[in-house]
Image (cartoon, helix red, strand yellow):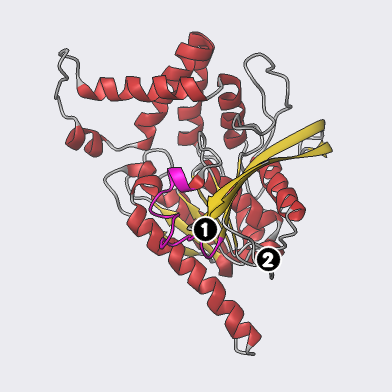
Amino acid sequence: MTTRGSADTPPVVDDTIAWQHVALEGGDVVPHVRVRYQLEGTINAARDNVVLVVHALTGTVQASTWWKGVIGEGAAIDPTKHAVLCANLLGGCDGTTGPRRDAPDALPPITTRDQAALLARLLDALDVEAPLLVCGGSLGGMVTLEFAASFPHRVRSAVCLAAPAVQTAQGLAWNALMRRAMELGGAREGLALARMIGMLSYRTPEALERRFGRTKDERGAFQVNAWLDAHGDRLVERFDAASYGALLDAMDGHDVGRGRGGVAAALAPVADRLIGVGIPGDQLYPDHAVREWADACGARYLDLPSVHGHDAFLLEVERVARIIHGALTGARAREHDVAWGAQP
C-alpha cells in the first residue's frame, strides 16, 4: 500500500486487495483474485461519503487524472469532501487480475456482472455499505448499471453515461473489428490498430473535420492520421492486448436483464435513483440506446449534446460535472427528506 498527501492536499491511498476462490457468473471459480484500487480523500466516520467511479475500457485507477474537471478540489466530486474510490476492473491490466500476453489463460471469461460483484466485495472490505454515488461511462456505465441491478439496496444514486443496458449490434461490430485487428496484427501492432479503430467510434466525423480537415504536418502527412497513430502507440506502451480482448468480451456479453426478467424488471427497483445520460451523435452507443432503458424502467434521462460524440463523457467536463453535482445533491436531499419524515 502506498499513501501520499500533505496538509494541503487530500490523502491518496493506492492499494491492492486479494480474495481466494472467487466464483464467476459463468460457473468458473478463480483461485486467487487481486484488485488494485485508489482512494482519494478520507472516508468519514459515518462511511457515507464514498463516490465509486467506474473507469471505461482503457481507464486507470487514477480517476482524478482522466476525469479532471469532474473530480478535484472544488469540482462536483471533491476529494476534500468525498472519498473518491476507483478500482481497476476485473480483467484489467492496471494491477487487477486479468489475462496477459504471457499468461492468456490467467482468468476465465468474465462479464460486467462479475466486475460489478467484485466492486461490491471491495466496498465490503472498506466497510462501506452504500456509496453516495456510483458513476461511469461506456464500459464503466455498463458496470454501473450492473451494480445498480445487482445491489439496488446499496445504491443511493447512480449515473450511467453513454452505455446501453444490453450490448448493441453496433457495439458488437466495432469490437469485432478491434478483435480481428489484434488477431492479425499481434500484441503490439494489432493492439495499436484496434485502438485506432476504437478512436473512430469514440469521435464524430464533424469533430474530426473541425479539428483536422485535410491539414498536414511538417512531414506532409495528414494530421488526422498522425493523431490515430499517436493514440495507437500510446496505448501499446501501457496496455496489454490479452486484457483488452477480455474486456471487449465482457462488453459483448453485457445484458443487465439476463436472468432477471428483462431490463425494465432488473432496473425498476433502483430507477428512482438512476440517471441515464445519452450523447446525440454517439457512433458507438447512440443516445437512443440509453433512452430506451431509462424509459423502460422509469429512470431519469438526460441528453449531453456534443460535437465530440461518445468521448463527450470525458471531454465535456463542465456539463458532466453539473450532472454529477445534481445527482450528489439529489442523493443528499432524498436522505434528508426521509430523515425528516417527508415523502422521498
Q: Where is residue 324 in the image (x, y as percent from the top left)?
A: 45, 62
Q: Nearer the viewer, residue 285 or 187?
A: 187
- Residue under label 2, please give it: 47
* 295 left or right, relative to 120: left
Characterize the magenta stretch by its predominant secondary structure: loop
Q: In this view, does 163 lie above or below 127?
A: above
Question: Foreground residue, 188 or 196?
Answer: 188
- Which residue reaches farthest bottom? 341
Relative to 232, say whether 163 is above or below.
below
- Sequence-first disc among 1 and 2: 1
The image position of residue 170, as x and y in percent, is 45, 35
Q: Which quadrant holds the N terminus?
A: top right
Crowding at dot 1, Cα within 10 Å, few <14 / some 14-19 / many 20+, comes out as few
The residue mark sitting in front, 1 or 2, is 1
Pick the front one: 6 or 344: 6
In the rendered image, residue 72, in percent from the top left (x then y), is placed at 44, 55
Corner quadrant of residue 230: top left
For residue 81: magenta?
Answer: yes
Q: Residue at x 27, y 20 (%)?
A: 226
**Residue at point 72% right, 49% down?**
122
Crowding at mark 2 (Cα within 10 Å: few <14, some 14-19, many 20+): some
Residue 90 in the image, given as x and y percentages of width and height: 66, 36
Q: Can residue 28 be seen in this view?
A: no
Type of the residue with mark 2: Arg
Q: Residue 7 carries which label?
A: 1
Q: What element carries label 1?
A: loop
Q: Does the magenta stretch include residue 168?
A: no
Q: In which quarter of the image is residue 97?
A: top right
